[in-house]
């Protein structure tokens, strides 16, 4: 069985080919390296994990409520459309929205894997190549996880959103070696991290919460890598070169804010396209979601040195400029700590189960070994 049998819509093409330009760069200096990046590379090696064993795939998932998101968060909630829906309709709508959202995570992770591999090829510094190689493996694992969840637990996959595909294409087509960093590590990964965090902190379902926490632990390292590498590089660029990269950031932020909204789910449900767009625009949850999507991007953009007047005006227009003062380090530390807490809780539960099992075996063995008291023959007395 192939994924094509799970798609809500037939993808436009089975393989998307993005013509690439730029140079593959080799470095013959195997000793020179930045201590910060080499330390991150070591951490990347130490933190590799197996999605098959670390995640408890036996946890049950209701395919008609896979994420446990409150109905109030659906853009159609509390409208005449919602009032006319049967319980079966509402179940299916929850399933479609969950599938659409996790499908975009899946496609984004494949894009991150390709971009990380591109960085290995094109970045001039060997320390950055080393780390990007570990990230490529991380992103492959994430694509594996989201794909497995959609196939086995939801049974439905959506094609890549046109606007996400457009941003991936722009990122990959650019011949400048730093653009996969900027497009993927800062914009797409930043948007994904914020979306992961909102869902992780909203869902009451154990399996998706576990998945999101563990993926975010990896992504915290990836964003740190992008910040280090780009901060060093952008300190050497001219004003003209910095403004060119800011234009790319502005276009990408508007694209994701205005268009990555899942209106296709509502039109699949029979709503006219105009109504779907209006409901998505008016939804208080989606307005908050669109704003919080930039909680990881804005401080990162500021940190790497892209903070020109036009970019700041764009962030004022989006209502997110104040996020530039947020502590990205604190957010990333919290992402890592939550995954470690999940591990500790799971290990403690497994240890308790083992203790109970051993105690039961010991008790059963003790009962079986007690000598049976038999009445001997009576004497003639």
Image (spheres, rainbow, N blue to C red):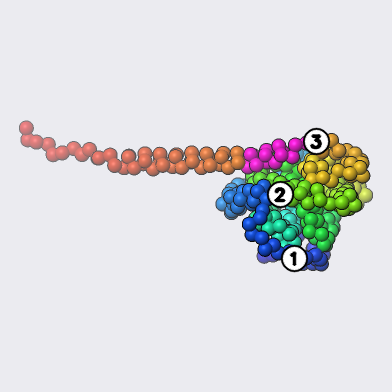
Q: Residue furthest left?
A: 381
Answer with mark 3 or mark 2, whichever residue precedes in sequence: 2
Q: Nearer the viewer, residue 290 or 253?
A: 253
Q: Where is residue 220 shown, x and y percent of the image?
A: 69, 45
In the foreground, 142 or 59: 142
Could you tell me how far apart the alpha carbons at marks 3 and 2 are, in whole angstroms?
20 Å
Query: Which residue lies at the image location 80% right of the left edge and 65% below the top edge?
Result: 22
Circle 1 sits on which residue? 24
Q: Is residue 368 visible?
A: yes
Q: Residue 370: name its quadrant.
A: top left
Q: Residues within 10 Å of mark 3 (few under 14, many from 20)?
A: few
Q: Are marks 1 and 3 in contact (CB under 8 Å)?
A: no
The part of the chain drawn in magenta is: 326-339
Quadrant containing the N terminus in the rendered view: bottom right
Residue drawn at (73%, 56%) of the image: 112
| Residue drawn 71% across the image and 39% down it | 329
Residue under circle 3? 325
Disc number at residue 225? 2
Q: Secondary structure at mark 2?
A: helix
């Amino acid at each position: 069985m192939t994924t094509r049998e799970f798609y809500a819509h037939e993808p436009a093409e089975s393989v998307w080919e993005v013509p690439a330009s730029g140079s593959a760069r080799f470095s013959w200096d195997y000793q020179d390296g930045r201590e910060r990046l080499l330390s991150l590379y070591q951490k990347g090696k130490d933190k590799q994990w197996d999605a098959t064993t670390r995640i408890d795939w036996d946890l049950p998932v209701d395919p008609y409520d896979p994420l446990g998101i409150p109905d109030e968060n659906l853009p159609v909630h509390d409208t005449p459309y919602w009032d006319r829906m049967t319980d079966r309709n509402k179940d299916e709508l929850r399933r479609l929205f969950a599938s659409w959202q996790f499908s975009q995570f899946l496609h984004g992770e494949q894009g991150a894997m390709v971009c990380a591999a591109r960085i290995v090829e094109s970045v001039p510094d060997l320390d950055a190549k080393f780390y990007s190689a570990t990230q490529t493996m991380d992103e492959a694992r994430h694509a594996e996880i989201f794909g497995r969840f959609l196939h086995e637990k939801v049974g439905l996959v959506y094609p890549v959103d046109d606007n996400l595909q457009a941003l991936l294409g722009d990122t990959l087509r650019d011949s400048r070696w730093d653009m996969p960093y900027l497009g993927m590590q800062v914009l797409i990964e930043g948007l994904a991290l914020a979306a992961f965090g909102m869902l992780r902190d909203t869902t009451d379902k154990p399996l998706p919460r576990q998945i999101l926490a563990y993926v975010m632990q990896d992504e915290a390292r990836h964003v740190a890598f992008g910040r280090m590498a780009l901060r060093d590089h952008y300190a050497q660029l001219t004003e003209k070169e910095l403004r060119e990269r800011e234009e790319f950031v502005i276009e990408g932020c508007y694209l994701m804010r205005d268009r990555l909204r899942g209106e296709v789910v509502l039109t699949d449900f029979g709503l006219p396209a105009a109504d779907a767009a209006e409901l998505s625009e008016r939804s208080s949850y989606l307005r908050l979601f669109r704003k919080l999507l930039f909680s990881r991007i804005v401080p990162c953009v500021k940190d790497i040195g892209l903070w020109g007047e036009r970019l700041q005006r764009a962030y004022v227009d989006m209502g997110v400029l104040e996020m530039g003062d947020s502590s990205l380090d604190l957010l990333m530390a919290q992402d890592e700590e939550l995954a470690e807490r999940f591990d500790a809780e799971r290990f403690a539960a497994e240890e308790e189960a083992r203790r109970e099992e051993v105690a039961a075996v010991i008790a059963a063995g003790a009962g079986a070994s007690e000598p049976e008291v038999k009445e001997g023959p009576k004497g003639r007395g």
